[in-house]
Amino acid sequence: MLGLNEVCCAGTAKAERIKMTETKTNHPTEFASLFIKGVQRAAELQKKSLDDAARQNAETIAAYKKGPQAVPSAPAVYDLAGEAFAGYIETQKSVIDHIVKQTASLVESAKDSGDSSQKVAADFTKTIQQSIERAVEVQKKALDLLTQEAKTPAASKRTA
């Protein structure tokens, strides 16, 4: 027959096992949420850095425009460079946003699939394929923009 102390300890041990099980089942979800918040914060920091670079670029271009011009068409070149840089900044922000979305999607997929490593691998492969397609799309847009801007000064020189 069990004594009072043994019954009390057995009940406490069972309660501790239940508590540990609950902690274990909640831990991955909490970690996933923390991970996503970290990715979002890193993305915001990167976007702020890009905004600072764009601001500094605009200030530099403005300063060069105020200086003496050895080449009469230099201000137009500065404008073109500024527009190209602004396009680059927006492209990078778009890529950052896409990475955050893809990461969140991957984490959600991993949480939903539980122990199914095949499903996680399949979802991860799909996510990577979508990321590559999006990156190619963004790069094509950037190249098209640069091509268009490169043609613009050439056309204006011919008419001048």
Image (tube, rainbow, N blue to C red):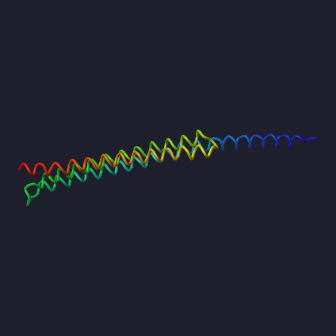
Q: Residue 74: x percent and y percent?
A: 12, 56
* Closer to us: 106 or 117: 117
* Closer to us: 62 or 91: 91
Instruction: Please state the total of marks drawn on the protein image.
Output: 0
Query: Residue drawn at (54%, 40%), measured in percent from left and top?
Result: 108
Point out the residue furthest to the bottom here: 70
* Closer to us: 97 or 14: 97
Horizontal side of 103 relative to 135 (left or right) equals right
Point out the residue furthest to the left here: 160
Horizontal side of 35 relative to 95 (left or right) equals right
Query: Residue drawn at (27%, 50%), measured in percent from left and top?
Result: 54
* Closer to us: 48 or 153: 153
Q: Residue 116: x percent and y percent?
A: 63, 43
Query: Residue drawn at (85%, 40%), measured in percent from left and top?
Result: 7
Horizontal side of 70 relative to 6 (left or right) equals left
Query: Residue drawn at (20%, 49%), measured in percent from left and top?
Result: 149
Q: Residue 114: x percent and y percent?
A: 62, 41
Point out the residue furthest to the right here: 1
Q: Which corner quadrant holds the N terminus?
A: top right
Q: Residue 48: x percent and y percent?
A: 34, 48
